[in-house]
């Protein structure tokens, strides 16, 4: 791929306009319903505005925002070191990084977010589920009112809100995670068939006795890390403008914000991060990951992730309180805020433009909102940028096929936050796989589309009517993001 600079972007071969008619892809039948895009919009390739990065290989998700100054890039590198390097067991001479566990899922952030990309489900025969988590809860009763407000769930009494399948030496892990799959076939109108797989979870070797008989399980793979600071900088009013919880416009789309607990202020606020938008900001998202994934306390999440019923675990030495200092948390948060979004590729390619039209024809943009303009931001480089994340950050009912039947704050068991699509076409290059959705069940983008139900059922049915050329065009557009 030829090297190029941001100022050369409009004239680079990857982005050069090419006159073409959508009719060439057999769209005559839906001409009236399909918007025509004969060329890219001005600046459309710059998904993150002036923060967009020009990197497209395995390191595409690990670059600092393009508009960070050299001094700020040093801060980015410091944060990266804390994100990448492993934490150790207490007591240790490395006092800034000790206190790991005793129960954990991993010993470093990078182990789940490899190359800052998305994780994958546990592999057959794997000894652990690194880059995949299993969340736990039980049906809530009146006695859970306080914990519901603060955590959004009623945790499993012995194992808590997340299964830790690893532990430090001398401590029993909470269990082993195994996945198998059932399959079924989805047929397009032209007879083309796609096999879809449904994960089937097994928890073996429970280390602290049987789980509650009504335990609710949710499989979660680690999401990609790019553009998080920009999503954080979208004004709340802009998110709420897209909410239509009662579907007053009658389009079948009823997105709504999750309302979650802010650990710093003690207030209920709009959620943005996590598969069900269960976290309000990046600092809390990171602190929660330190606490639940690595057993590390912070000023936002103090104490131990070992439950009261795991007394032996709670009695072990820790790394002090807090184990993750405010300084380290701030450095990691700076890093995660400023991971740059790569530019789009081939935005003026006729097939990509045809796919963009089909994306809109199917109504995908109703949830995957193409553009926002950021407001004031924690980092000035992220403020007032026209961005193209393809998400509304709202909750949508995706139907029984994708339901985990586990509520989280105001999200129901079938609701999920719309995931951003920017960077999705670089998943193979960065992560070495193309496994999508919250549990990684989809092995490619077409499978991910076909799992959409609920509010997206009409869109799915429209896609099922696409012929081979139209399917290829839609996928070319998604792969350009």
Image (tube, rainbow, N blue to C red):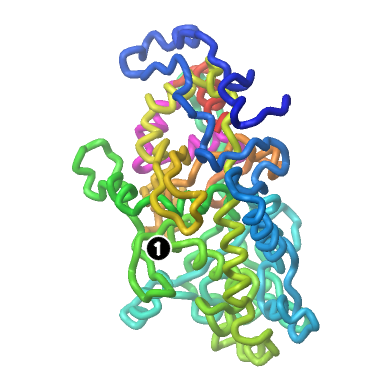
Q: Position of residue 108 (x, y in %)?
A: 70, 65
Q: Position of residue 247 (x, y in %)?
A: 23, 44
Q: Position of residue 180 (x, y in %)?
A: 64, 52
Q: Quadrant of residue 189?
A: top left
Q: Residue at x 51, y 32 (%)?
A: 186
Pick the front one: 207 or 372: 372
Q: Residues within 10 Å of mark 1 (few under 14, many from 20)?
A: many
- As drawn, is 372 to the left or to the right of 274? left
Pick the front one: 166 or 319: 319
Query: On screen, 343 above or below 346?
Result: below
Predominant secondary structure in magenta? Answer: helix
Query: On screen, 165 above or below 189?
Result: below
Is residue 154 among the parts visible in the rendering?
yes
Q: For residue 265: magenta? A: no
Q: Residue at x 57, y 78 (%)?
A: 298
Pick the front one: 422 or 47: 47
Is residue 129 among the parts visible in the rendering?
no
Q: For residue 453: magenta? A: yes
Q: What element does badge 1 sit on? A: loop
Residues rendered magenta in the picture: 441-465
Farthest-out residue, left: 248
Q: Residue at x 49, y 22 (%)?
A: 355
Query: On screen, 150 above or below 376?
Result: below
Circle 1 is placed at which residue position?
Answer: 407
Farthest-out residue, right: 93
In which quadrant will I find the C terminus? Answer: top right
In which quadrant will I find the N terminus? Answer: top right
- As drawn, is 381 to the left or to the right of 124? left
Q: Position of residue 82 (x, y in %)?
A: 69, 66
Query: On screen, 74 above or below 249?
Result: below
């Amino acid at each position: 791929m030829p090297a190029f600079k941001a100022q050369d972007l409009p004239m680079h071969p990857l982005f050069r306009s090419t006159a073409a008619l959508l009719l060439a892809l057999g769209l005559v039948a839906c001409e009236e319903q399909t918007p025509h895009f004969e060329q890219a919009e001005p600046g459309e390739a710059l998904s993150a505005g002036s923060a967009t990065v020009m990197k497209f290989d395995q390191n595409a998700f690990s670059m600092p925002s393009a508009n960070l100054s050299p001094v700020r890039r040093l801060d980015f590198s410091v944060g990266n070191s804390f994100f990448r390097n492993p934490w150790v067991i207490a007591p240790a001479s490395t006092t800034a990084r000790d206190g790991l566990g005793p129960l954990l899922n991993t010993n470093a952030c990078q182990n789940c977010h490899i190359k800052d990309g998305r994780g994958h489900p546990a592999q057959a025969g794997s000894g652990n589920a690194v880059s995949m988590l299993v969340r736990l809860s039980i049906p809530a009763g009146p006695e859970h009112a306080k914990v519901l407000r603060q955590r959004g769930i009623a945790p499993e009494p012995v194992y808590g809100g997340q299964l830790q399948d690893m532990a430090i030496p001398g401590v029993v892990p909470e269990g082993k995670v195994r996945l198998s799959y059932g399959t079924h076939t989805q047929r397009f109108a032209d007879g083309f068939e796609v096999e879809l797989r449904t994960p089937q979870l097994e928890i073996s070797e429970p280390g602290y006795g049987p789980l509650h008989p009504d335990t609710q399980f949710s499989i979660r793979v680690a999401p990609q890390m790019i553009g998080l600071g920009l999503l954080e900088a979208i004004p709340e009013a802009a998110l709420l403008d897209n909410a239509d919880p009662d579907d007053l416009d009658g389009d079948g789309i009823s997105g709504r914000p999750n309302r979650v607990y802010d650990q710093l202020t003690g207030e209920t606020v709009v959620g943005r991060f996590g598969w069900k938008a269960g976290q309000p900001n990046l600092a809390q998202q990171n602190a929660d990951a330190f606490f639940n994934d690595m057993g590390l306390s912070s000023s936002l999440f103090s104490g131990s992730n070992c439950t009261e019923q795991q007394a032996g675990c709670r009695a072990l030495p820790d790394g002090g309180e807090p184990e993750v200092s405010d300084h380290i948390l701030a450095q990691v948060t700076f890093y995660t805020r400023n991971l740059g979004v790569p530019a789009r590729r081939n935005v003026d390619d006729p097939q990509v433009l045809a796919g963009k039209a089909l994306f809109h024809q199917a109504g995908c943009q109703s949830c995957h909102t193409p553009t926002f303009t950021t407001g004031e931001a924690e980092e000035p480089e992220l403020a007032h940028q026209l961005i193209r994340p393809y998400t509304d950050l709202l909750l949508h009912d995706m139907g029984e096929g994708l339901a985990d039947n586990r509520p989280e704050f105001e999200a129901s068991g079938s609701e999920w936050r719309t995931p951003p699509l920017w960077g999705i076409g670089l998943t193979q290059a960065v992560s070495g796989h193309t496994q999508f959705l919250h549990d990684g069940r989809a092995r490619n983008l077409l499978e991910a589309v076909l799992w959409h139900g609920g509010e997206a059922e009409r869109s799915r049915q429209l896609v099922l009517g696409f012929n081979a050329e139209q399917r290829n065009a839609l996928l070319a557009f998604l792969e350009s993001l």
